[in-house]
Image (tube, grey):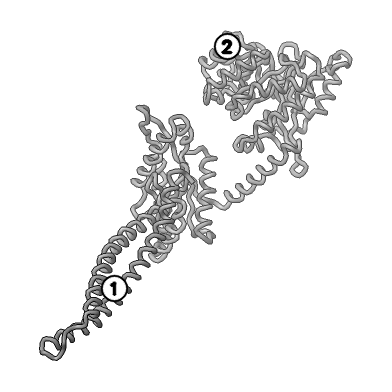
Amino acid sequence: MTTEEKPANEEAVQTPVKAKSAKSRSYFYGAAMVAAIGMFVYVGGSVGTDMVRQVIGNSKGADQVMVTALMLNIALILLIWRRTTELSGEVDVYRKAEVRAQHLAITDPLTNLYNRRAIKDKTTELSARAARRGKSVAFLMVDLDGFKKINDLYGHDVGDQLLREAADRMREVVPPSSIVARLGGDEFGICMVFEPEYPETVDRVAEDLVEILARPVTIADTDQTVTGSIGISRPEFDCDSIDQLIRRADIALYAAKKNGRNGFSWFENGMEVELRTRNTLEADIRAAIPNDEFVPYFEQQINLETGKLVGFEMLARWVSPTRGLIPPDEFIPVAEETGMIGDLSMGIIRKALLEAKDWDPSLTVSVNISPVQLKDPWLAQKLVKLLVETGYPANRLEVEITESSLFKNLSLAQSIVGSLKNQGIQIALDDFGTGYSSLAHLRALPFDRIKIDRSFVSSMLDNAESEAIVNAIAGLGASLAVPITAEGIEDETVIAKLHELGCSKGQGWHYGQPMSIEQTRRLLADYGLLVGKAKPHKKKANKPKSGDDKDDKKVANG
């Protein structure tokens, strides 16, 4: 419960109790008034009769006791009347307060929309009214993309301002009969009526919502932009309850975010199956980390001039007792999204360094760092700690950073890269040409190597644009005196061209598939590159077997 909701909820609970107490007292005073009036009639009648008799001479006068009782009775009636009048005003105040408390109980105080508590009942009511008129309802789950960044950057007051602005914009777009609610944080729910035969009506509303939410908002004299992702569901397709309708909209929202945000998706049955599969995968990953099921695989890196093996790039694999060998593109995105990537990555790197410390000192190991890990200000210290614990030399370790991750937080990346460089660790800029890097980034960060993305290398002989990009990157490396590694070498014909351009190292399936620890150990033993083994004898780097699946090349890059 937020601080802004707590007082409203307390009032919603306490006001009906006070109103009930006031009503009970009003009933008591009403009954007392009736009794007092009855007594007045009785006593007044007796006194009146005595006074009439005195006038006609048939009595000595009214009984003094009865007169006194009559006066007291009149005073009691006046007192009760006054208290009843006051209590009536008090009941009226509490009645108004009760109405306000009921409003607060179902309203979000920040945006004045309905709250999560009310959305189910209001949607049920709207759905019932729509059904009586032969219409249907659609439930839209709306989430603001980028809200957390602005909230963290400018503070909660600005975040509240942004939420109010978003609420006002949504009111402008949705049909007047719609239910609009803030479900919590930056998530909103909308229930709208539409003709079942024309779902495109809902599409138009969703498009308008996406468009109006993406308009800049002026904050602190600057224009800030957030976008909206929307999931939509409707009850006609095997939907048994309002709870299920809302849950399906939430599932569709997840799909909209997965598809790139700033858009909308309708719920489809396959989404629910996919979400269950994804949740099962997440649970299995969470269990697999302490069970030590993630292992390093190694891809050879070759000196393009001499053809000698000079190192390996470490790639992540998951050896599951139930799922088998799982490539990284299946589990890395989930690990990044759930925050497990740090523990997972460090565990694999530890295993790789323990293995590689027994290799020939001429061999290096390259490890990939996730963009999510690059947000960790303690990343450099964690890597250095691994070096100390495993005894692996810092100068034989190369850390690869994707250029897209630099765009998100350059200052933190500079700090991390600087700390790693101070320890003697080499830094490579990975997947160059696919993201946002510029010459400014290359000047700001002291990279020891640039890696050309495999998509350009593998197609450079068939695609003039890819060849031009490879030529440009190679020329850039030469002008900056930064060595170039070419990824994705798939056949021998491209090697001479890459060497001619000045690429010093290469890797790819032409030299062999990524290998397990045992396979790598056997290869190094054959070359005499294990510590204490014989000197290497003349042998070419491994070639892929003829039965290799070419479609798995993306997996090999981990």
Residue 87 lies, with reference to residue 73, above or below; the image says above
Q: Position of residue 18 (x, y in %)?
A: 39, 59
Return the residue nearer the eye: 124 or 332. Answer: 124
Q: Position of residue 172 (x, y in %)?
A: 33, 46
Residue 323 lies, with reference to residue 117, above or below; the image says above
Instruction: Tell me which numbered mark, 1 or 2, is placed earlier along the sequence.
Output: 1
Name the residue tied to disc 1.
33
Q: Residues within 10 Å of mark 1 (few under 14, many from 20)?
A: some
Q: Number of callouts in the render?
A: 2
Residue 21 lies, with reference to residue 298, above or below; the image says below
- Amino acid at dot 1: Met
Q: Position of residue 547 (x, y in %)?
A: 77, 33
Mark 1 or 2, which is nearer the eye?
1
Looking at this view, name the residue that lies furthest to the bottom: 58
Where's the C terminus, which quadrant?
Answer: top right
Return the residue nearer the eye: 362 or 118. Answer: 118
Callouts 1 and 2 close, C-beta under 8 Å: no
- Amino acid at dot 2: Gly
Task: Inspect this view and state whether residue 193 appears.
Answer: no
Name the residue tied to disc 2.
475
Return the residue nearer the eye: 74 or 532. Answer: 74
Q: Secondary structure at mark 2?
A: helix
Label 1, label 2: how many angstroms apart (C-alpha)? Answer: 103 Å
Q: Which mark is residue 272?
A: none
Residue at 35%, 43% (x, y): give it: 168
Q: Position of residue 175 (x, y in %)?
A: 35, 52
Residue at 65%, 31% (x, y): give it: 342
